[in-house]
């Protein structure tokens, strides 16, 4: 059959469908960008909000408030972080209370020791017997008035000196006077 058909079409008309397709492609690209941006915005909020709440609770803990409320209902990494954070706050609260109790006990014990030391010092000072309180290395820490009268040395003169050395010097003085 040797029939040949020729179709003539204007160039503008031939490429008109390509222009429509290009316009549709730009429109589709625009909507894709808008949808992706909105999805990113809401996803970021869903991620950032819990982290901001955790940050606020961390600030409370750093200021000494250990009773914090952390959202642990989520089943993702943020939920796991919240749960770990809550456990940490409970442990810190327990350790802080325990430490505070120990400090109070130690304070009471020190106050009792201080009161006993005052009583002891008063008893030593009011004693008619000569008393010198010594350190383990035999240095004089304190003497009472009876010691001062007996030896002739004042507290400020002999504090920190070795008692044996003082009596050695005193013996030498008496030997020289004889």
Image (cartoon, rainbow, N blue to C red):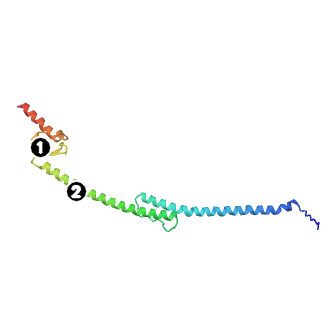
Q: Is residue 84 left or right of residue 97?
A: right
Q: Position of residue 168 (x, y in %)?
A: 12, 36
Residue 98 appears at what percent x and percent y? 33, 61
Residue 22: which quarter of the image?
bottom right
Residue under the point 28% across and 59% down: 105
The residues tagged by marks 1 and 2 sit, at their Cα atoms, a distance apart of 28 Å
Local packing at callout 1 (Cα closer than 10 Å; few below 14, some 14-19, many 20+) is many
Quarter of the image where the C terminus is located: top left
| Residue picked out by circle 1 | 147
- Give left or right: position of 55 versus 14: left
Residue positioned most to the front: 1
Q: Quadrant for the N terminus, please.
A: bottom right
What residue is rendered at 88% in x and 61% in y?
A: 10
Residue 98's tag is: none
Q: Residue at x 15, y 40 (%)?
A: 163
Up the image or down, 157 lies above or below 95; here it is above
The residue tagged 2 is 112
Q: Is residue 95 above or below residue 163?
A: below
Secondary structure, mark 1, is helix
Tell me the element at label 2. helix
Please state the horizontal and vertical placement of residue 133, each as a whole percent of the image.
Answer: 16, 46
> Exactly how many numbered labels are in the figure?
2
Residue drawn at point x = 19 percent, y = 52 percent: 118
**Residue at the outermost right position:** 2
* Quarter location, residue 155: top left
Could you tell whether 136 is left or right of 16 in the image?
A: left
Q: Earlier in the sequence, mark 1 or mark 2?
A: 2
């Amino acid at each position: 059959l040797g029939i040949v058909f020729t179709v003539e079409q204007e160039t503008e008309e031939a490429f008109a469908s390509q222009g429509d397709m290009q316009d549709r492609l730009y429109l589709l690209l625009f909507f894709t960008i808008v949808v992706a941006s909105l999805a990113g915005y809401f996803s970021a909020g869903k991620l950032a909000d819990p982290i901001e709440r955790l940050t606020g609770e961390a600030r409370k803990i750093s200021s000494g408030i250990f009773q914090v409320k952390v959202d642990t209902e989520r089943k993702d990494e943020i939920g796991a972080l919240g749960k770990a954070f809550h456990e940490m706050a409970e442990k810190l609260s327990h350790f802080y209370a325990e430490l505070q109790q120990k400090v109070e006990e130690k304070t009471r014990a020190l106050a009792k020791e201080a009161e006993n030391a005052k009583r002891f010092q008063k008893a030593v000072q009011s004693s008619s017997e000569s008393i010198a309180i010594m350190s383990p290395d035999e240095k004089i820490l304190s003497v009472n008035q009876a010691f001062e009268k007996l030896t002739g040395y004042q507290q400020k003169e002999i504090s920190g000196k070795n008692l044996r050395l003082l009596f050695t010097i005193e013996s030498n003085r008496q030997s020289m006077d004889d």
